[in-house]
Image (spheres, rainbow, N blue to C red):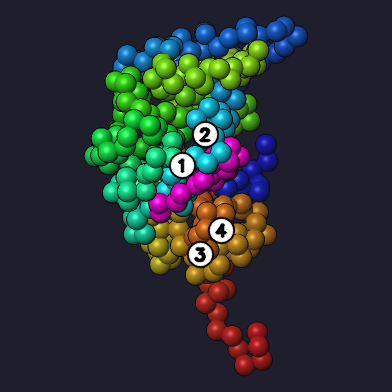
Amino acid sequence: MPNTPYRLHYNENPLGPSPLVMDRIRAHLAGLSLYPPRDDDALRNRLAAFYGRSVTPDHLFTTYSGSEALDLIARVFLAPGDEVIVCGPTFHVYERTAAWQGAKVVDVPLDGEDFSVRTDAVLEAVTARTRLVYLGNPNNPTGSIVNREDMDRLHEGLPSSVTLVSDEVYHQFVTHPDYPDSPADAVAGRNVIVLHSFSKVYGLAGLRVGVVISRPDIVERLAGLRRTFHLGSLEMEAAAAAIDDQDHVAQSVALAEQGKKTLYAAFDRLGVACWLSEGNFVLFRTPVPADELTARMADRGILVGSGNRFGLTHSIRVSVGLPEANEAFISALECILIDNRQPVTSDGR
Ligand SMILES: Cc1ncc(COP(=O)(O)O)c(C=O)c1O
């Protein structure tokens, strides 16, 4: 894959998949003419052993990506006229998949300062029609988390008719000590659906594998939408191999941690406000409109995520890349900001 344009717009793993995954995929290519197992039992057994904490295969449902899991959750839980709560700015797929089922989407915006979830406001927004509350944890694009205390408040305050969807596809990057243990909550019988994905730290976005962790009765409802051949053989082989290489995960997390430090220092030097992130991306404010800055970055071969799609007209989300990509991003930002500060001369330039 070419290094440029630098892909800092989709929160991918710049290291790519683990070498172990690549070996396992290569070894599996000769078997591509064979049907895969109809079920995902082997992968769920592997996942259960990996998660530990009393997670059993009955707590797990695998999907064709985290995005598909969100679609299946909406299809199982929602009917026209139902309501869901989202806390914006957040991942647009919550709203989109709920709206596809005819549900009304109620936005309870995150706190404007630090993007924390306003738990009281969420609980007040619940009606008899509310079925799901979506939490990005860490949230995309803000990188903020829902801490243990707020998660507990939500669980305690929500009626049993409302299920929490805790989207934790970036959980491996979190270092905050108050991050909740949602898989343990699910095992303890709380009304929560936890979402994991192989697209982020595992670097397998192109293969599309997601995992839901929840109470066995909820998993059973989702399993009603199981496919005849549930996942492809390459997907299952690659996911199992990815779990086997936790060194690669640690390396990827360390790269993101180091990259965030570089970005924070650069933002500080350039006088650009940003939010500390628990993901592999950082949201920052820009004096130039987000779409314009995104386009000017693209002209320089650097792809970043305009905040406009999240309703943020002057913020940009940049993924952490390899050091070279981070440096290219920083120099481009600096040039654009300097250009922007040039006074307009009397002849209109
Ligand atoms: C918060 C969040 N949830 C879920 C996803 C979906 O990931 P995938 O469909 O690749 O598993 C993404 C992808 O960007 C995301 O940012």
Name the residue type under label 4.
Asn
Helix, strand or loop at disc 1?
A: strand
User: Which quarter of the image is occupied by the C terminus?
Assistant: bottom right
Name the residue type under label 2.
Leu
Position above or below: 152 against 270 = above
Which corner quadrant of the image does residue 145 belong to? top left
Counting from the top left corner in percent of width and height, residue 334 is at: 52, 65
Helix, strand or loop at disc 4?
A: helix
Disc 2/disc 3 C-alpha distance (Å): 34 Å
Residue picked out by circle 4: 308
Magenta region includes residue 96 = yes
Counting from the top left corner in percent of width and height, residue 51 is at: 38, 18
The residue drawn where x is 47% and y is 42% is: 83
Disc 2/disc 4 C-alpha distance (Å): 28 Å
| In this rendering, position of residue 37 left or right of residue 316 | right
**Callout 4–callout 3 Cβ contact below 8 Å:** no
**Callout 1–callout 2 Cβ contact below 8 Å:** yes
Residue 78 image label: 2
Magenta region includes residue 273 = no
| In this rendering, position of residue 227 left or right of residue 69 | right
Residue at disc 4, CB closer than 8 Å to ligand 1:
no
Residue picked out by circle 3: 314
Q: Mark 1 or 3, which is nearer the eye?
A: 1
The residue drawn where x is 55% and y is 11% is: 40
Name the residue type under label 3.
His
Q: Which residues are magenta?
A: 91-109
Counting from the top left corner in percent of width and height, residue 258 is at: 40, 43
